[in-house]
Amino acid sequence: MKKLFLWTLVIVCSGTLPAAPPSVKQSMYRGWGEDQLAFREQITLSNDHNYYAITIAQWKPKEKQEPQTQFWLFEPRMSGGFSRPVMDFVRLEVNGISEIKLQPKKEDIRTWQKEDLAGADLTLNYDGAKIVMSWYLRSDSPVLWCTLKPAPDTLEPVKSIRLKISMVPSKLAKDAKGGVVWSGGYKRQALTPARLIEQSAEGILLTKSDSWLILQDEIFDGSDKDKGDGPCIIIPGYENAVSSVLDLRNSWINALNIQIQPDFKEFKFGLWQQKNPITNADAEKLVKNAPDRFKLK
């Protein structure tokens, strides 16, 4: 007992307490727009570094509109970054079918925990071509990780697969009357280990040297209350990717469009944002000071 106490004291004093394992919880989503939803399951993931809440939502049908399925990310914040009501933070199109047209069921979601991982698998059925979208946290990282794989019981081959990740870096610009500026008024940038990418009307082809992307705005740099929440981060996977094109135009919303090889066995990527505002400079330090936390494994 004395040895155990001394060993615990040494660990505490040295600041090397092992990270607690991440956790996962599935529940019914409650919040913005819930009364208009026919399906609303939420996956909450947390660890010592961060927490995220992914919502699989299906809008009720309207007179001239069929039910629509979306993926939302409303935690750790509900504005800026990958979070904004009505905005899909990810879209996955398989064989020309968007996830908007899918009919999710509660049994399609399976939560799981391992020693240093916790996550949830979502099986998506694109007319027989089934894909498992697995969201998870590692105990050593603040990043929300995702793996895409063909389901073992898939009935149809994947002929095409495209992933779109959407984000609103820092904040929405407002005009003199307080209205949202949808186009113009921004100075979007993407910082990578290899370069600083400035906003452009044309898509920007990424390479493997762009192993992480800090999506930021030079005007809304997170440095003050009126300067927004600051950057969000994408760790794009390149293995099994045909192309990765960044849409970084002068607009309220930006996106990364990834075309994946149809015969892929696995595709990985990661997303990061935090609750509290962060400056462009501090986001860069965050990644560079702890590179392993922002690295695909």
Image (cartoon, rainbow, N blue to C red):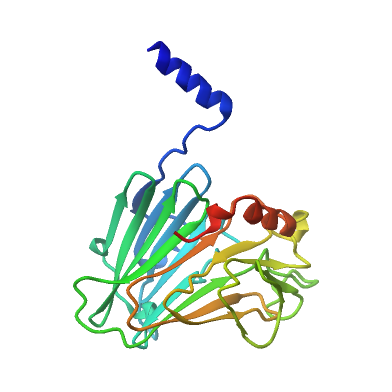
* Relative horizontal placement of residue 15, taking residue 21 as reference (left or right): right
Residue 288 image-quadrant placement: bottom right
Is residue 224 visible to the viewer in this orientation of the structure? yes
* Relative horizontal placement of residue 195, taking residue 224 as reference (left or right): left
Q: Choose between 150 and 238: the one closer to the eye.
A: 238
Does 269 appear above or below 20?
Answer: below
In the rendered view of the protein, which quadrant contains the C terminus?
bottom left
Q: Position of residue 224 (x, y in %)?
A: 78, 54
* Residue at (53, 66) in percent of width and height: 85
Does 218 appear above or below 118?
Answer: below
* Relative horizontal placement of residue 258, taking residue 27 as reference (left or right): right
Q: Choose between 200 and 53: the one closer to the eye.
A: 200
Q: Choose between 31 and 206: the one closer to the eye.
A: 206
Q: Position of residue 119 (x, y in %)?
A: 36, 54
Q: Position of residue 262 (x, y in %)?
A: 35, 84
How many numbered dots are placed on residues in this image? 0
In the rendered view of the protein, which quadrant contains the N terminus?
top left
Q: Position of residue 275 (x, y in %)?
A: 59, 51
Looking at the image, the residue that sits furthest to the right is 176
* Residue at (44, 75) in percent of width and height: 91
Is residue 76 visible to the viewer in this orientation of the structure? no
* Residue at (26, 61) in percent of width and height: 106
* Residue at (71, 79) in percent of width and height: 199
Residue 254 image-quadrant placement: bottom right
